[in-house]
Amino acid sequence: MRANTVYLILLLSTLSAGCQTAMIRDDLASIRPDQAKTIAMDWADMIAGRYPAKSVFLIHGQGDIGKALSDALRNRGFGLVTPDQGEAGNIPIEVRTDNIEEDSVLVSLIVEREIISRTYSVKTTHAEPSSRFTRLLNVEE
């Protein structure tokens, strides 16, 4: 039953991803900075496997996970720019988070034309992946 709930939430969050254009929400999940750091390191590993080290990212969503992701990517040698520096030639990443039940968090990144999501089980000092990365093509422009 829990797996069905997680997949339903992933589907609904993906379908509603284009509905939130005025403000990127990276602060809906209730997590602590140490948990955000664990999640961000997981995403940085995934991103590092897909993009060359010379890539420059623009992170939208500066909640705990967005800030931790910026730090994790910077520590891996990636470049980061701020919104006032513009998006031209940079890879935008939108970070979105939400709570699932009491001890789970859904994290979705919109990278270029893909929506990538993963759920995490939140522990006392860290978070552990509780699903695989799910990739969907974002057809909205």
Image: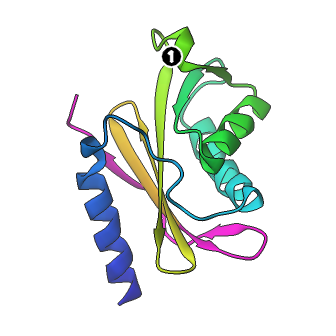
Answer above or below: position of 83 versus 39.
Answer: above
Residue 88 percent location from the top left of the image: 45, 9
Color scheme of the displayed model: rainbow
Q: Amino acid type of disc 1?
A: Asn
Q: Is residue 31 left or right of residue 119?
A: right
Instruction: Verify whether residue 4 appears in magenta.
Output: no
Q: Quadrant of the N terminus?
A: bottom left
Residue range (magenta) = 120-141
Residue 7 percent location from the top left of the image: 33, 72
Answer above or below: position of 31 versus 89.
Answer: below
As drawn, the residue found furthest toward the bottom would be 1
Please identify the quarter of the rendering in which residue 3 is found.
Answer: bottom left
Residue 100 percent location from the top left of the image: 45, 73
Answer above or below: position of 11 versus 55.
Answer: below
Q: Quadrant of the C terminus?
A: top left
Residue behind mark 1:
90
Q: Residue at x 68, y 55 (%)?
A: 36
Q: Is residue 109 left or right of residue 103?
A: left
Q: Is residue 138 visible?
A: yes
Q: Is residue 22 left or right of residue 42?
A: left
Residue 12 percent location from the top left of the image: 26, 62
Q: Is residue 133 visible?
A: no
Q: Residue at x 59, y 65 (%)?
A: 30
10, 32: nearer the viewer: 32
Q: Residue at x 67, y 40 (%)?
A: 67
As drawn, the residue found furthest toward the front would be 22
Please identify the quarter of the rendering in which residue 71 is found.
Answer: top right
Q: Residues within 10 Å of mark 1 (few under 14, many from 20)?
A: some
